[in-house]
Image: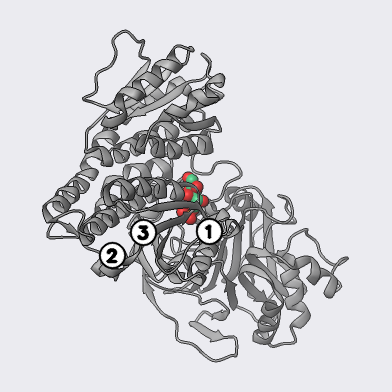
Amino acid sequence: MCGIIGYTGKKEAEEIMLDALEVLEYRGYDSAGIAVCGSDGGVQIRKCAGRVKDLRSLCERVKVSGACGIGHTRWATHGGVSDENAHPHMFGNVTVIHNGIIENYKRLIGKYDLQEKLQSQTDSEVVAAVLEHFYNGDPYAAIRKTVLKLKGTFALGIMFGDIPDTVFAVRNVSPIVIARAEEGSMMASDVTVLGQYSKEYFVLPEFHVAVLKKEGIELYDMSGEAVEPQWLTVSWDVNRSSKGGYPFYMEKEIMEQPEVIWETIEPRIKNGLPDLESDGIPDSLLKECSHICVVACGTAMHAGLVGKALMQSLVKMHMDVELASEFMYTDSLVDEKTLVIAISQSGETIDTLEALKYAKKNGAKTLAIVNVKGASIARESEHVIYTNAGPEIAVASTKAYTTQLAVLYLLTGRMAYVRGIFDEAKTKEFTAELMRVPAVMQEVLDRREEIHYIARSILNAKDVFMIGRGLDYSILLEGSLKLKEISYIHSEAYASGELKHGTIALITEDTPVVAVITQDKVQSKEFSNIKEVQSRGAEVILFMKESYRLDQDAAWDSVFKLPEMRDEFMVMPVSAALQLLAYYVSLDKGLDVDKPRNLAKVVTVE
Ligand code: F6R
């Protein structure tokens, strides 16, 4: 959940690392630090609790110079947020940055008698100490021996004081990508930082040691054999990693949706039909399964819920959606007839990764829907479909979610076609409607100031309820998560019909209710449920299809009329509207929209 960076080359490492840490800050932002190997060979550390901007001012006050270094931005797990717990950690001759969790760190402290010798409360400093214990001039031997002692997940950047201008990297589960730049060699937690220096990179294989030098990169397996890296090309537009004139990444990413949804669907539509051949997805995978199970967390899990509604109503296919963190512990029933779909923006969420491994072990076929190319979940899965959302930097997921939905529509259409549920004409109609999504979403985005105005009515609320039925309920679960994570307003999504079985007791005139009505078959029931909350004094903010008629007797506070699509596609314009609602509440409350408290973009701890 932390961001790591390493650089060695001809330029000042401090400058490159501080810029990179600013980009990586979305991975964790409670403290930051860098270690720089100076021309005299000595390693100097600057670190502090706080944001990268605080580290930058520290570095301005106390200069550090050298062309090789490692840097870190932290999301605390072991040890509170403090200067001494910030990375890098130096122990004797060894300096380390770490992303992950060393589960057996307490045993290692006992085994190597470190109790009195550590400066911090972190598991990471223990790694530095064990490396120092094994180091006798041979860095590979020390790294190999140390890694064999570690239990848990780790992405490590390592410098040895007596080996100038060299950064070593090794990992298990937690990601490291490596690139050769004109000015030197770099490693980082993800490719967004490397894009501006190089178009070529490779994912460091697990339990391999990379050696970064000014002149180039070497890669070795654990037996010391040299290995050829598998180079990949950065396919993301570097400009997508900048704010592009918007005050926050979240707004920019919301606004990018029509374009990235198009980029996700267009290459996968041939002759008007969804076609997943270029992703290597055989029709047999979609034809032969008898059951689908989605494993995912948070927003990605909410995408799965929309997928379930589509698969069940259109393909008549049984589909479960499981919280990845619960999947292994509830004796989930999957077998060789099950298609398990892991959905993940980062492709690194440890719960989703572990659930995927569990599914494979139980014989299930696996398919991943992932945004980050080459990520662990993509590599672990037999099949992968990449969403072409580009880098998503804001912690709250927006465009990754709607491109996941776009892939689920493609899968639904293809599955219905190959299973003979849709004939060619019906499949083409379905695909044509999917191709309208970018334009319809654009209409909502163009009217964002209307939503900004509406957002004012919940600015001071302590609690908000969101109600809807069927697909409207699925999308409200996501809308509600967006609101709570970035505005800190307690919000709960409820299936409208369920409200009166208890929760309606909480509805008062101080509890705004957000209602969504876009499904013809439950329209009248939803209007009745709205009346129930209005009669208890609640102010209702309504998002509904523009063709629906409002009851003139009721007092309507805020209504946003949504451009129309076929019912099963209405989640797309609704998601844009609810994302904007959450965004403007957070913005107008003056909060740090992109970096909400306590969160991190990539969740690599269980
Ligand atoms: C919320 C959000 C999270 C993620 C979840 C899974 O806005 O972004 O709920 O969806 O942590 O992350 P990924 O998709 O990277 O597996």
- Mark number, residue 162: none
Q: Nearer the viewer, mark 2 or mark 3?
A: 2
User: As shown in the figure, which amino acid type bears the numbered disc 2?
Assistant: Lys
The disc, 1 or 3, on the residue closer to the chain's N-terminal end is 3
Where residue 467 sits, quadrant-wise, is top left
Can residue 456 be seen in the rendering of this structure? yes
Q: Is residue 536 above or below residue 83?
A: above
The disc, 2 or 1, on the residue closer to the chain's N-terminal end is 2
Q: Residue, x 62% and y 48% (percent of image)?
A: 54
Q: Is residue 61 left or right of residue 23?
A: right
Whole-percent x, y for residue 309 in the image? 35, 45
The disc, 2 or 3, on the residue closer to the chain's N-terminal end is 3
Would you name the residue on which mark 1 appears?
332
Q: Residue, x 33% and y 54% (percent of image)?
A: 317
Q: Residue, x 40% and y 71% (percent of image)?
A: 382
Would you name the residue on which mark 2 appears?
287
